[in-house]
Image: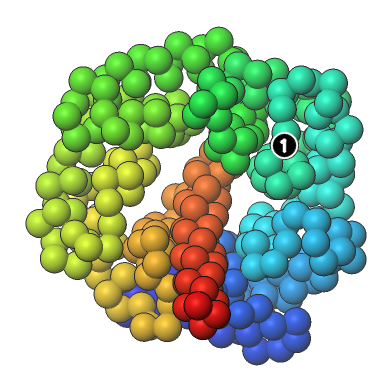
Amino acid sequence: MTAPLDRFLALSEALRDSKPRPDRQAAAFAAVALVHATGEDEGLVAATKARHEALTTALGGFRAPNGSMRWVYAAMLAAHGVEPDHFLGARQALRQECRASKTGALHAGGSRAALILSLGEEAGPQTVQAFYAMKRALRPPWWRSDDAVTDTFAAAQVLAHTQPDSIRAAREHAETVFGADRRARGHKRDGARQCVLLEQAPERVLVRFNAIEDARRADRFLRGQSDRAMAMDWAAAGRTPEDVQHIAQIAAAMPKHLPSIGHARTRLAALIAFDDQARDPARSANALAAVIAAQAAVIAAVSAASVAATSASTS
């Protein structure tokens, strides 16, 4: 095993070693948020638990982020040394201006955007107004609107101090580049979002995407445990076919009890393998989106299985 994987496993077990105790799934997704953080494991785990307790005291048992997701938020805050009050203040400020902004609902009660904004400066009136201006500019037509995506990228672009008009133009260019490619066109919007956020030229990302897609399909493990959407994620993050092999090796070495639903095991492995996503807010936002996408897939699959089992037992 590699050093990051060893640390990930140690953090995951440490999170489950005392009360409150996350389940294995929550511990895994929280640990991946901590694996590249600066500091001793013991201190990071203690900071995560303290932030989880503070969020529970402030939000109760039902307000978002709740359930397993609350552990992910607590770990992200701990990894970046952000105090819970900073996050909670950003969340409240966003909620107060939501109706007046006329941008629709906030995802998870404003929690997603607040987490990303809290990685930067104080979420004062100017930051809140900048977020809603960005959301208005980036919000797609209603038939493909997803507040989880829009809130994530709007908040991240605010931290990057970019202008809405320039982002729109850059996205349109990137979508044109990806749309002209047979394999990339199905992921042109997500690829464009990431290119602009990570300041990557779409032409170069497309070359990497096709090389990574070839490598992914040639690997027996990854062919069944990843997809083209992940290949686009990796290309935008600057990965190479050699990096993809490293991801596959870590995924194969991970314990069997870790989830594989929705390619979660491979998504976790990609975040464990490289530390560059922990260095700045833009990449942290991308990493957060990847973690939450993986966890959401697991939760959805488990819920579907529970419904199916209940239906079968009562029919």
Left or right relative to 222: residue 162: right
Q: Residue at x 81, y 29 (%)?
A: 98
Which residue is disc 1 drawn over?
106
Q: Residue at x 65, y 68 (%)?
A: 68
How many labels were placed on the picture? 1
As drawn, 215 above or below 184: below
Which residue appears farthest toward the bottom when viewing the image? 17
Residue 63, horizontal then vertical, whole percent: 80, 56
Residue 156, horizontal then vertical, whole percent: 60, 34
Image quarter in which the N terminus is found = bottom left
Q: Residue at x 67, y 45 (%)?
A: 112
Circle 1 residues within 10 Å: few <14, some 14–19, many ≥20 = some
Q: Please state which amino acid type lies under the numbered disc 1.
A: Leu
Q: In the structure shown, which secondary structural element does the residue marked by tag 1 occupy?
A: loop
* Among the 4 quarters of the image, the one containing residue 22: bottom right
Res. 97 visible in picture: yes
Q: Nearer the viewer, residue 90 or 68?
A: 68
As drawn, 35 above or below 195: below
Q: Nearer the viewer, residue 312 or 227?
A: 312
* Among the 4 quarters of the image, the one containing residue 165: top right
Q: Residue at x 55, y 51 (%)?
A: 288
